[in-house]
């Protein structure tokens, strides 16, 4: 399909080179750019052996792929990989993630989310965010500390909790669950990473179901 997009005017498929480069090699992680330079020098596309995938490396190729409606996030059923039983809880949740969907399902869910992120609502949050930032800064400990944990990670997760109406006391749980689940997409994941992701997924699902059930109850009679 990508070959059809990038075919030249004579109707021939472009020659695609194959490269092997471990994405977890320490030298590559520290400086990946020489590899990317070699890949770009040989055309719009290349086959990355370690990922078993075709990669687009030019602006023209990436733009063509993004605009082609035949290319999307959802994998056709006949090409979908088998999911190991121990990972079923994680992928049952990911199956409903907007990051994994195409229209019209993506459009429907995006419309629901955008109701909480209107420009007016975001503008209204500015004083609240400023106050939160000052509170966190005032609470900085003396001596050395991790600014990511004390500030940078804390601000967004608390604001998201407020937007969703989730108790702020669970902000740390939301962050920990998210980090554990996102680790499923890191190169070289292990069974330990998978087990932590499954535990986080199940805890998150249990929390959300309890939260929805609680808020779905009618208010007490006065």
Image (cartoon, helix red, strand yellow):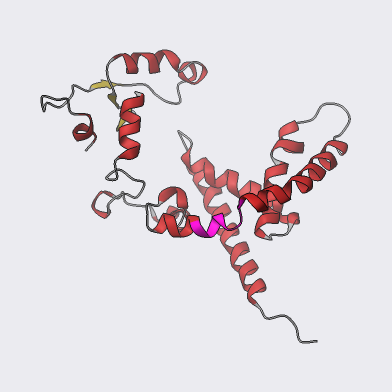
Residue in front for this viewpoint, 176 or 123: 123
Task: Residue 78: say if magenta.
Answer: no
Residue 132 appearing in the image:
yes
Comparing 149 with 106, the one in front is: 106
* x and y percentages locating residue 179 in the rendered image: 59, 43
Q: 138 above or below 36?
A: below
Residue in the image at 71% along x and 34% along y: 148
Q: Is residue 4 above or below residue 196?
A: above
Q: Is residue 120 above or below residue 146?
A: below
Q: Which residues are magenta?
A: 111-118
Q: Quadrant of the C terminus?
A: bottom right
Question: Could you tell me residue 70's position as x and y percent?
Answer: 27, 45
Q: Nearer the viewer, residue 164 or 209?
A: 164
Q: Position of residue 184 (x, y in %)?
A: 48, 43
- Identify the image quadrant of the N terminus: top left
Q: Which residue is most to the front?
A: 120
- Does residue 114 belong to the magenta stretch? yes
Q: Residue at x 29, y 41 (%)?
A: 68
Q: How many marks?
A: 0
Residue at x 32%, y 26% (from the top left corner): 60
Q: Quadrant of residue 92?
A: bottom left
Residue at 37% x, 21% y is 21
For residue 76, side relative to residue 135 (left or right): left
């Amino acid at each position: 399909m990508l070959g059809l997009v990038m075919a030249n005017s004579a109707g021939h498929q472009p020659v695609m080179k194959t490269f092997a480069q471990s994405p977890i090699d320490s030298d590559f992680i520290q400086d990946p750019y020489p590899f990317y330079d070699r890949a770009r020098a040989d055309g719009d596309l290349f086959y990355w052996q370690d990922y078993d995938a075709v990669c687009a490396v030019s602006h023209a190729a990436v733009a063509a792929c993004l605009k082609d409606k035949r290319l999307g996030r959802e994998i056709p059923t006949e090409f979908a990989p088998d999911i190991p039983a121990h990972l079923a809880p994680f992928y049952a949740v990911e199956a409903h993630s907007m990051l994994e969907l195409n229209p019209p399902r993506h459009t429907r869910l995006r419309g629901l989310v955008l109701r909480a992120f209107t420009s007016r609502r975001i503008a209204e949050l500015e004083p609240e965010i400023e106050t939160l930032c000052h509170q966190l800064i005032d609470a900085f400990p003396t001596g050395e500390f991790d600014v990511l944990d004390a500030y940078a990670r804390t601000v967004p997760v608390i604001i998201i909790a407020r937007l969703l109406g989730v108790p702020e006391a669970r902000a740390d749980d939301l962050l920990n669950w998210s980090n554990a689940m996102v680790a499923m997409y890191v190169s070289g994941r292990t069974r330990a990473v998978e087990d932590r992701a499954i535990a986080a997924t199940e805890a998150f699902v249990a929390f959300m179901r309890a939260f929805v059930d609680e808020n779905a109850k009618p208010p007490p009679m006065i």
